[in-house]
Image: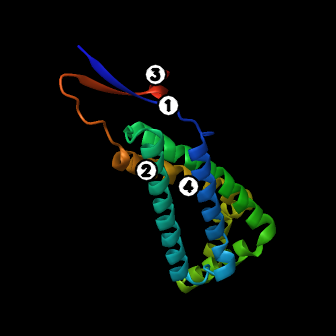
């Protein structure tokens, strides 16, 4: 039996296309991370939601364009689901690291008052709900550990990785493309990364 084998070169987090995508998205993330300081989204929740939606839209567009370019120009137009997931998740790791470092710097040095404003807004909302001072104090103490710059940076890192995995699954499914069947032969689309996997 004859086999027509299509091989994809290995992919790593240091691949040029992955790095370019990751750093581009990180810059987008940093711009939108500055939004709470510039637009006072703590008090204007509607504006905050709109900014987050715009950020997500831009992120999706960038992933789509860069992954399609990678598939069509570097892989000959074909790509497995696993390779699409790898590309997006590797780029997300870069985004997560860069943006979480920036978030820490922002909370610690650029705009340290932002967390105080958020806490004050939270206390005001609890007061509107009729909570007593003791209940408000207890709630503040329970959530206080998650309001430090380091904690927020870690949460940001984990959130970026989580959404990177979700987007990787989505784009891997959408962008996968198998070679067309060849008459009188069986095609095998081989990912070189999978050769070394256990």
Judged by depth in the image, the label closer to the viewer, 4 or 1, is 1
Residue at horizontal 57 percent and vertical 36 percent from the top? 12
- Is residue 131 visible in the rendered structure shown here? no
Residue on which the image places disc 1: 9
Name the secondary structure under disc 4: helix
Residue 68 circle label: 2
**For residue 9, above or below residue 173:** above
Q: Earlier in the sequence, mark 3 or mark 1?
A: 1
Name the secondary structure under disc 2: helix
Judged by depth in the image, the label closer to the viewer, 4 or 3, is 3
Residue on which the image places disc 3: 195
Q: Earlier in the sequence, mark 4 or mark 3?
A: 4
Residue on which the image places disc 4: 159
**Can you give x and y, in whole percent of width and height, for residue 111 in the image?**
76, 72
- Is residue 44 visible in the rendered structure shown here? yes
Quadrant position of residue 36: bottom right
Q: CA distance from mark 2 to mark 1?
A: 16 Å
**For residue 130, above or below residue 31:** below
Quarter occupied by the N terminus: top left
Q: CA distance from mark 3 to mark 1?
A: 11 Å
In the image, taking residue 101 as reference, residue 89 lies left or right, namely left
10 Å neighbourhood of mark 2: few (<14), some, or many (≥20)? many
**Can you give x and y, in whole percent of width and height, for residue 182 in the image?**
23, 29
Q: CA distance from mark 4 to mark 2?
A: 25 Å
Name the secondary structure under disc 3: helix
Judged by depth in the image, the label closer to the viewer, 3 or 1, is 1
10 Å neighbourhood of mark 3: few (<14), some, or many (≥20)? few
**Can you give x and y, in whole percent of width and height, for residue 98 in the image?**
68, 54
């Amino acid at each position: 039996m004859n086999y027509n084998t299509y091989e994809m070169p290995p992919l790593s987090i240091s691949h040029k296309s992955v790095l370019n995508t990751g750093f581009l998205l990180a810059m987008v993330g940093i711009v939108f991370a500055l939004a709470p300081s510039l637009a006072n989204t703590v008090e204007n929740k509607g504006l905050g939601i709109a900014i987050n939606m715009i950020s997500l839209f831009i992120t999706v567009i960038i992933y789509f364009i860069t992954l399609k370019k990678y598939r069509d120009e570097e892989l000959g137009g074909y790509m497995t689901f696993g390779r699409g997931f790898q590309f997006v998740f590797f780029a997300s790791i870069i985004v997560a690291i860069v943006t979480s470092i920036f978030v820490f710097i922002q909370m610690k040095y650029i705009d340290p008052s932002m967390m105080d404003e958020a806490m004050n807004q939270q206390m005001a909302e609890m007061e509107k709900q009729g909570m007593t001072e003791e209940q408000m104090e207890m709630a503040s103490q329970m959530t206080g550990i998650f309001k430090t710059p380091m904690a927020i940076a870690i949460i940001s890192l984990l959130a970026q990785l989580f959404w990177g995995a979700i987007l990787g699954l989505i784009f891997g499914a959408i962008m996968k493309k198998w070679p067309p069947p060849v008459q009188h032969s069986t095609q095998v689309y081989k990912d070189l990364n999978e050769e070394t996997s256990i």
